[in-house]
Image: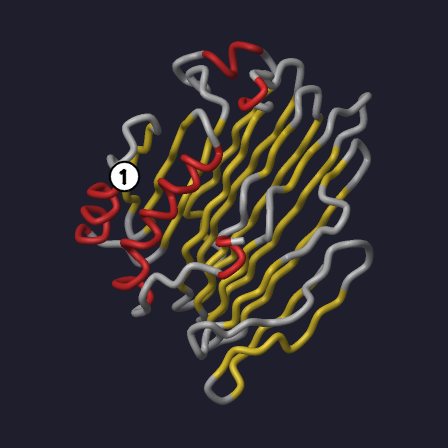
Amino acid sequence: MSLQLERRGERTVLAGRRRRGPLAVQRAFYPEGEVCHLYLLHPPGGLVGGDRLEVEVDLAPGAAAMITTPGAAKFYRSLGPRAEQHQTLRVRDAALEWLPQENILFPGANARLDTHVDLRGDARFIGWEIQCLGLPSHQQRFDPGCASLRLRVDRDGEPLLWDHRLIQRPEDLDGPSGMRGLPVVGTLIATGADERILRLARAVSTMDTDTLIGVTRVEDLLIARALGGASDRVRAGLAAIWSAIRPPLLGRPAIAPRIWAT
């Protein structure tokens, strides 16, 4: 699926979309005026071995959009073939918030998830990715299972962050340099951060003592990493950081997408 967004008058509009397969966007929402809110829909609800989803989002200069999903994406057990999800987000002198709900990787899944954020000029970006490895509510570990999780952020062709987590052995789940025995991992990134933004993010990151959140800054890129025992707790922790940093970074109050309340 390919989405093109551009500024027309006082609003950002969905100027173009192409799709082949089940991924869809039904309509745009405007709960805060100019910002275009979009919900990515995947009616099958999950991926099996051999499935491949591709999402391309392109924001033209001056556009402002928030993109999320109505529910978790599921990667089911595979007999061998890999399920893949590739996402490319191009932001050209525009502002994008990429806030999908979590990916749930069932025990026995073989998955590759790649996200590439391509920033150009004065692009602004706040986004997160949350991965739940296994089914912690049913005490089912991601063992066996294989997951390749990649996040890449570039600005004007230069790398800001290249992150790759490979989970394929039990020690990748339990080791001190791995998941520390916690099944849910999340990463939030935001551009335009300074010391004030870093302090705001760190102040709210300690609200849930059961979720481990570390916040750092590399030049103007804020990076928050979370480990926890439940997807909703990790998501709430990252959402608290988003709520704190959105007003100073984007000049807008933190208005959550309506779909999160359903």
Q: Is residue 96 above or below residue 166?
A: below
- Outermost bottom residue: 9
**What is the count of numbered marks?**
1
- Outermost front residue: 262
Label 1: which residue?
205
193 or 42: which is nearer to us?
Answer: 42
Q: Which residue is pictured at 53% across the width and 86% down the height?
A: 8
Q: Quadrant of the N terminus?
A: bottom right
On screen, residue 24 versus residue 66, left or right, reads right
Residue type of the residue flagged with mark 1: Ser
Q: Is residue 77 above or below residue 157?
A: above
Q: Is residue 169 above or below residue 158?
A: above
According to the image, what is the colour scheme of the structure?
secondary structure
Mark 1 surroundings: few (<14), some (14-19) or many (≥20) residues within 10 A? many
Q: Quadrant of residue 143?
A: top right
Provide residue 72's location: percent of width, then percent of height.
60, 42
Provide residue 90's location: percent of width, then percent of height.
55, 61
138 or 127: which is nearer to us?
Answer: 138
On screen, residue 121 versus residue 192, left or right, reads right
Q: Is residue 194 above or below residue 248?
A: above
Q: Which residue is pictured at 59% across the width and 12% down the height?
A: 169
Q: Quadrant of residue 177?
A: top left
Provide residue 123's location: percent of width, then percent of height.
42, 65
Q: Which residue is pictured at 45% across the width and 78% down the height?
A: 34
Q: Which residue is pictured at 44% across the width and 12% down the height?
A: 175
142 or 233: which is nearer to us?
Answer: 233
Q: Secondary structure at mark 1?
A: helix
On screen, residue 131 versus residue 214, left or right, reads right
